[in-house]
Amino acid sequence: MLCITPQLRKLAFKIDYLEKPHLDNERKVHKEPKPYLAAVGIFFTFWISYLIFIRDLSTKTFFIFISSFLIFGTGMVDELYGEKADRKTEDGFGVFKQNYQAL
């Protein structure tokens, strides 16, 4: 994680994948743009570590990975386009239901 975070930060600035502060939005507390790509590093570091140390390659692990990837992807799309909360909740429950039925 410590090795890839600086590269992800540079990439976020390069591709302009930043949260830019808006003066009219009181929820935004920072004054300068902040990169969004930290979640990418956390997500992939977790799964790489899990697969290296736990070494569980079962069907259950596969479905959990796919579920977490879809939820992660929904979050990334939300950061870009501002998806509504009820839509994200529907997506999350839909992923859960699909994978629960598959197990």
Image (cartoon, rainbow, N blue to C red):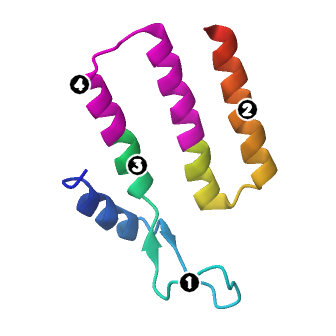
CA distance for labels 2 and 4: 29 Å
Q: Position of residue 36 (x, y in %)?
A: 46, 62
Lateral position of residue 16 relative to residue 84, left or right: left
Residue drawn 40% across the image and 49% down it: 40
Among the two numbered marks 1 and 2 on one chain, the one whose residue lies closer to the N terminus: 1
- Say which amino acid is labelled 1: Val
Chain part drawn in magenta:
45-72
Q: Nearer the viewer, residue 74 or 85?
A: 85
Among the two numbered marks 4 and 1 on one chain, the one whose residue lies closer to the N terminus: 1
Would you name the residue on which mark 3 appears? 40
Among the two numbered marks 3 and 1 on one chain, the one whose residue lies closer to the N terminus: 1
The quarter holding residue 16 reads: bottom left
The quarter holding residue 11 reads: bottom left
What numbered label is drawn on residue 93? Answer: 2
What numbered label is drawn on residue 29? Answer: 1
What numbered label is drawn on residue 53? Answer: 4
Q: Position of residue 7 (x, y in %)?
A: 25, 59
Give neighbour class at mark 4: few <14, some 14-19, many 20+ (Cα, 10 Å): few
